[in-house]
Amino acid sequence: MTSAAIDKIPPQPLPKAYHILPESIDFIIPGFRSFYTPGDKTLALRQRDCEEWFNEFVDKLLAACGKYYLPVCRMSDGEFLFLLGYQPPNLRLSLKERAKQRINRFLQRLYCGWRFNAYTAGSGLFYSSGEYSYLEWQKAKKPYTDWLKKISEQGILALHLNYGRIPFQEYYFPALGRWMDRHSIKLTDYNYVPFYFVYAALTGPRRTDLLKGRRVLVVNSAEGEKHRQVEDGLRKEGIAKIFWHPISRMRSLYDRIDVTPFIGKVDLAVVGAGIGKPNIMIQLEPLQVPCIDAGFVFEVWANPENKRKRAVCAPDEEWKERKENNP
């Protein structure tokens, strides 16, 4: 949907129950101002300049490169579903849309056998997050919570607490707030940033600061041609040296990895492990470097055309160039 079309959608206030943080701020990221549409907000701990907040986040990553452990774990609708289970439909939808959503969810759960399965990301690009039985899914919630709590204490949770004119994942917010309260997970200026800050850091103007000349450990399931494409994409970003640790494609929640050979040899690690990423990121602590849950950015490194299939992956100048070439 174009920005002009989105502008025609009447603004919908965020229901009071969804305000799990005290403030909402305009969501504008340096290098991605073309992504912003009036009404795009993110929940925040205090009123602040979003662009300044983003730069502070990148500066934290730079300060940790090659020096200390700083895990950065993204959480959006897939992670919210895995952790919190199915939630009531979005209150910002009409009654008719909510009823339709309930029916679709029920049919989906019957079709999937009540298990947690892979999903398809936008624009027809298949993007697996993991495949687990219902029993595995339920049993994993306790260690999953423990891992995320540890990451919140040692690093950063990049939570998708954004909302705009089009209802999306905010119906998870109340359950997420209750989960944090129940497990004494307190968000602070240090351990919380918006989800899209990670994409912007790895694909926007400041990616050179973060990636160029670095020794990088890649933790990912890509094999064969996809493996080669990801490495080629990283080399184009100026990576000095690439190390690779393979993991399973659909079962990373149970993977055990050995990072001993890489200790002292890398400046940062980038992880693509689907739903199982907290398990992987906890095991990267001995490296004592930033460990970034890059997720979809691996698809961008493998094929630059994919950057236009996900928000905040194509910087302003690339959108401008595309518009000029396709008036």
Image: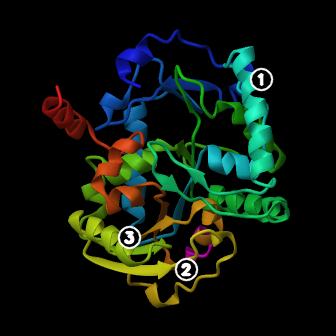
Q: Which residue is mark 1?
A: 99
Residue 13 percent across, percent down from the top left: 62, 14
Q: How many marks?
A: 3
Residue 185 seen in the figure: no
Q: Which residue is mark 2?
A: 286
Q: Nearer the viewer, residue 109 or 293?
A: 109
The residue range painted magenta reads 281-285
Q: Secondary structure at mark 3?
A: helix
- Seen as rendered, the residue at the extreme bottom is 261
**Residues under labels 1 and 3: Cα distance?**
41 Å
**Residues under labels 2 and 1: Cα distance?**
49 Å
Q: Nearer the viewer, residue 113 or 29?
A: 113
Q: Secondary structure at mark 1?
A: helix
Does 274 appear above or below 186? below
Q: Is residue 85 magenta?
A: no
Other-residue count near label 1 (Cα within 10 Å), few / some / many at <14 / 14–19 / ≥20: few
**What secondary structure is the stretch in magenta mostly built from?**
helix
Residue at (35% x, 74% y) in the render: 225
Of mark 3 and mark 2, the one earlier in the sequence is 3
- Contact between marks 2 and 1 (CB within 8 A): the answer is no
Residue 169 percent across, percent down from the top left: 63, 34
Q: Secondary structure at mark 2?
A: helix
Q: Which residue is mark 3?
A: 226
